[in-house]
Amino acid sequence: MAKVKIKVVKMLSSREVFDGNPPAEFNCSPKCDEYEIEEGREFIVDDSYECPSGFCPWAYADIQRDIVTLLHGGNFPWMKKEGELLSCCTDGIRPVIFFLERIED
């Protein structure tokens, strides 16, 4: 069965998202600093569908449907290359963008 590689592409800060003027106050760091997420880091998901060690479980819950689609051979028509997708977590204060790529065994 195929695997999916998750690559952390971009970690946006709240300053970037709101151009320095957020609509509300919040109690968290301006850039996601949870778990072992950092730009360039890669994680592999196999047919167990388990959240990779060190990966944010909240982010995994957000992108899991995309991972499952790729694991089962699905594609996304708006992507030029089959087996790839850009996806992101739904953290509205400091989102993280991921590149998902199906890896055939």
Image (tube, rainbow, N blue to C red):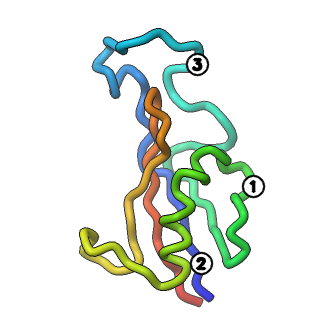
Residue placed at 41% from the left, 34% from the top?
Answer: 12
Kindly identify the amino acid type of the residue bearing the numbered disc 3: Cys
In this view, the residue in front, 65 or 46, is 65
- SS state under label 2: strand
| Crowd band around label 1 with a 10 angstrom C-alpha radius: few (<14), some (14–19), many (20+) | few
Question: Where residue 84 sits: x, y (%)?
Answer: 39, 71
Residue that mark 3 sits on: 28
Question: Where residue 3 sits: x, y (%)?
Answer: 59, 78
Q: CA distance from mark 2 to mark 1?
A: 15 Å
Residue that mark 2 sits on: 3
Residue placed at 53% from the left, 87% from the top?
Answer: 104
Q: CA distance from mark 2 to mark 3?
A: 33 Å
Residue placed at 52% from the left, 13% from the top?
Answer: 26
In this view, the residue in front, 92 or 6, is 92
- SS state under label 1: loop
Q: Nearer the viewer, mark 3 or mark 1?
A: 3
In this view, the residue in front, 57 or 35, is 57
Q: CA distance from mark 3 to mark 1?
A: 23 Å
Residue that mark 1 sits on: 53
User: Are circles 2 and 1 on residues that touch, CB within 8 Å?
Assistant: no
Whichever of callouts 2 and 3 sits on the residue coming sooner in the sequence is 2
